[in-house]
Image (cartoon, helix red, strand yellow):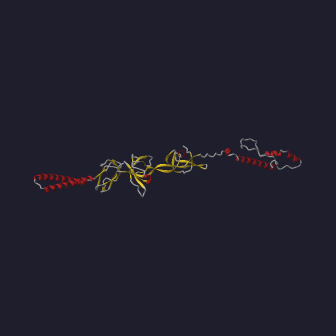
């Protein structure tokens, strides 16, 4: 219809397609000029036919230009994604490994608490006021070393009186023995004097012991792990003043299930871990000769060989000993990243999943504690 009313054709679009073209410019009056110069219009005027109004040709030319612009827009929208700059899809990692189960013989791990064989609370053995302190928390002390002293004035006076009585009775007994030999004293007199001498000696020893009770001393060599004594404080008999603990050796008491406990013997090796990243060698030193029927366990005592300064009495530790078969979830080491993640591939999609790794099972596989299930496919983790 456009050709019938002027022969105006849409021009080729600029900038679309593999090559850009530069057609001559198409103005809104171009079609009008062509229509006004056609022979048919002139011939019609000569035959007496009135020509079409000029405004109609102008409107048709504008419509032709609009159609041409719409065609250019449609062609630009139909361009391929590569021409439009659309990003390519990321490549899915290739699944190279599988999560599986493994049967391994691993040591049984049991919680325990370290203790020292020599661990004593030092109490007041006599009533009195604390006169001086000679040890502080954390001090290393030797057996019999003075820790504190109670006021001992009364005890010292009693000891001086007992010493005087004993010395007097010693002289009386010596004279009585001489008189008995010369017939100047009877046997009964001599026996009475000897009895009084023994009584004086007992009184003297008791007074010495009372004085000794005012001295608070360490029962054995160790470390002062508690100090409750305060200078000037009055204490009664039995009040706790200090606690002294031998730093080594350290022991741990565990109850092992019957199946594993039957295989363990005194002298078997073990290991102790305190959660600080180090294992300490240990050895079984005591074992119960029977299985405890209510619990189905056997009690064992292990001794830490060289605890050093990293282990302290009272610490909670894990004791590993014996061997028992266990089925665990495992995965290749190459499939688990160093920071604890694995790439799980499922139906062409990959997922980054956090994983908790346990023991090294050998053969390039590690134990998976959580994060993965048996049968899942894994890609090689980046290193």
Residue 201 image offset from top left, x and y in percent:
20, 53
Q: Residue at x 13, y 55 (%)?
A: 187
Q: Residue furthest left?
A: 183
Mark count: 0
- Using residue 277 as the reference point, say whether residue 248 is left or right of it: left
Taking the image as drawn, is residue 74 in sight?
yes
Which of 163/38 is in front?
Answer: 163
Q: Residue furthest right?
A: 47
Which of 87/324 is in front?
Answer: 324
Q: Residue at x 83, y 46 (%)?
A: 36
Taking the image as drawn, is residue 156 in sight?
no
Q: Quadrant of residue 236?
A: bottom left
- Using residue 249 as the reference point, say whether residue 108 is left or right of it: right
Q: Residue furthest bottom?
A: 294
Residue 321 image offset from top left, x and y in percent:
43, 49
The vertical placement of 83 against 122, above or below, is above
Residue 216 image offset from top left, x and y in percent:
30, 52
Image quadrant occupied by the C terminus: top right
Which of 74/199 is in front?
Answer: 199
Which of 61/96 is in front?
Answer: 96
Residue 190 image offset from top left, x and y in percent:
14, 55
């Amino acid at each position: 219809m456009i050709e019938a009313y002027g022969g105006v054709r849409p021009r080729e679009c600029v900038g679309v397609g593999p090559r850009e073209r530069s057609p001559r410019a198409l103005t809104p009056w171009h079609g009008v000029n062509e229509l006004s110069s056609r022979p048919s219009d002139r011939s019609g005027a000569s035959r007496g036919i009135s020509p079409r109004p000029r405004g109609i040709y102008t409107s048709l030319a504008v419509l032709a230009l609009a159609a041409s612009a719409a065609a250019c827009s449609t062609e630009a929208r139909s361009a391929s994604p590569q021409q439009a700059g659309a990003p390519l899809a990321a490549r899915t990692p290739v699944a190279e490994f599988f999560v599986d189960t493994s049967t391994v013989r691993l040591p049984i791990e049991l919680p325990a608490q370290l203790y020292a064989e020599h661990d004593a609370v030092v109490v007041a053995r006599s009533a009195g006021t604390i006169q001086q302190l000679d040890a502080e928390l954390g001090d290393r002390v030797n057996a019999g070393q003075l820790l504190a002293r109670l006021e001992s004035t009364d005890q010292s006076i009693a000891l001086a009186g007992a010493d005087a009585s004993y010395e007097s009775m010693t002289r009386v007994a010596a004279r009585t023995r001489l008189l008995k030999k010369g017939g100047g004293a009877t046997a009964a007199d001599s026996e009475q004097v000897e009895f009084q001498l023994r009584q004086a000696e007992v009184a003297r020893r008791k007074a010495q012991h009372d004085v000794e009770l005012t001295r608070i001393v360490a029962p054995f060599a160790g470390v002062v792990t508690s100090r409750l004594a305060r200078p000037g404080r009055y204490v009664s008999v039995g009040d706790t003043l200090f606690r002294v603990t031998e730093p080594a050796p350290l022991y741990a008491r565990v109850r092992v299930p019957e199946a594993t406990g039957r295989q363990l013997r005194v002298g078997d090796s073990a290991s102790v871990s305190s959660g600080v990243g180090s294992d300490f060698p240990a050895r079984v030193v005591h074992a119960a000769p029977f299985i405890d029927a209510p619990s189905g366990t056997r009690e064992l005592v292990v001794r830490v060989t060289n605890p050093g300064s990293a282990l302290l009495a009272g610490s909670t530790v894990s004791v590993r000993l014996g061997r028992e078969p266990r089925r665990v979830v495992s995965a290749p080491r190459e499939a688990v990243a160093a920071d604890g993640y694995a790439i799980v591939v499922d139906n062409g999609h990959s997922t980054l999943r956090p994983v908790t790794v346990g023991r090294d099972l050998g053969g390039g596989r590690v134990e998976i504690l959580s994060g993965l299930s048996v049968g899942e496919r894994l890609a090689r983790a980046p290193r």
